[in-house]
Amino acid sequence: MAETTLTETTVAEVMTELAELEDPKAREVNERHGDDHGVNLSQLRALAKRLKTQQELACRLWATDDTAARLLAILICRPKAFERDELDVMLREARTPKVHDWLVNYVVKKNPHSEELRLAWSADRDPVVASAGWALTSERVTKKPEGLDLAGLLDVVEAEMKDAPDRLQWAMNHCLAQIGIEHAEHRARALDIGERLEVLKDYPTSPGCTSPYAPIWITEMVRRQHDK
């Protein structure tokens, strides 16, 4: 019982500290990207570094349903400690883009159930959930492609990416690019699909950044590999 009280106090303290870090200008910028918090991410990471790994506190922070608290929870949790069903529920609760991205990249990818979740999420009817499955597939395309049907993935991208909702489309496009970058035998087809579908062709890109339009992205990354 004493431990629970201690944790509750800590949650209250952390929430107070997060409130103190709130910056209206940061919130304005974040809200343009669909993220409802105003905490500078460098300050959030500094707070996480100070708190170190605390799984129980992470779970309680997640339960607050506060975006900044959930981002902090992701940074201080123990990724391998979550059960498959816990992660499935958490992903469905993670409706803001940053929480969704961090949960997939910092937690699910390091969890022993990641492959099982990849398969389940990729086939989910919720496009935001499906986008997480495609993000995990992109990771496998790059790091562990053995056993993946790359031609089959290109078939799905070719048939469905053009009309997919934004976040699912973005994740599919990333997978298309990774197949083209990492697997020379599929590169010509990946480039052809990108050119025909023209997804993200007009996406505004800052100077010095690579366009997310797949043909430009693939060509540039392959060039960099050859220059090394």
Image (cartoon, rainbow, N blue to C red):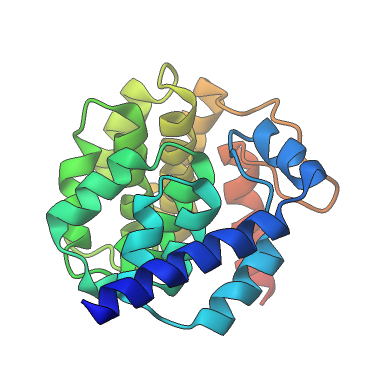
Q: Is residue 126 above or below residue 56?
A: above
Tell me: 35 left or right of 69. Answer: right
Q: Residue 133, position in %: x, y?
A: 29, 45
Residue name at image x 49 percent, y 26 percent: 166
Furthest toward the right, the residue is 207
The image position of residue 20, as x and y in percent, is 70, 59
Q: Residue at the top extreme?
A: 163
Place of residue 46 in the rendered image (x, y in percent of width and height, measured from the top left)? 65, 76
Rendered position, 188 above or below 155: below
Nearer to the camera, 91 or 20: 20
Residue 117 image offset from top left, x and y in percent: 19, 52
Is residue 6 visible in the rendered image? The answer is yes
| Residue drawn where x is 44% and y is 73% of the image | 76
- Residue 211 horizontal side relative to residue 163, left or right: right
Q: Based on the displayed image, in which of its 4 quarters is residue 206 positioned?
A: top right
Which residue is drawn at the image coordinates 69% and 47% (left, top)? 38
Quadrant housing the N terminus: bottom left
- Above or below, 127 against 92 in this view is above
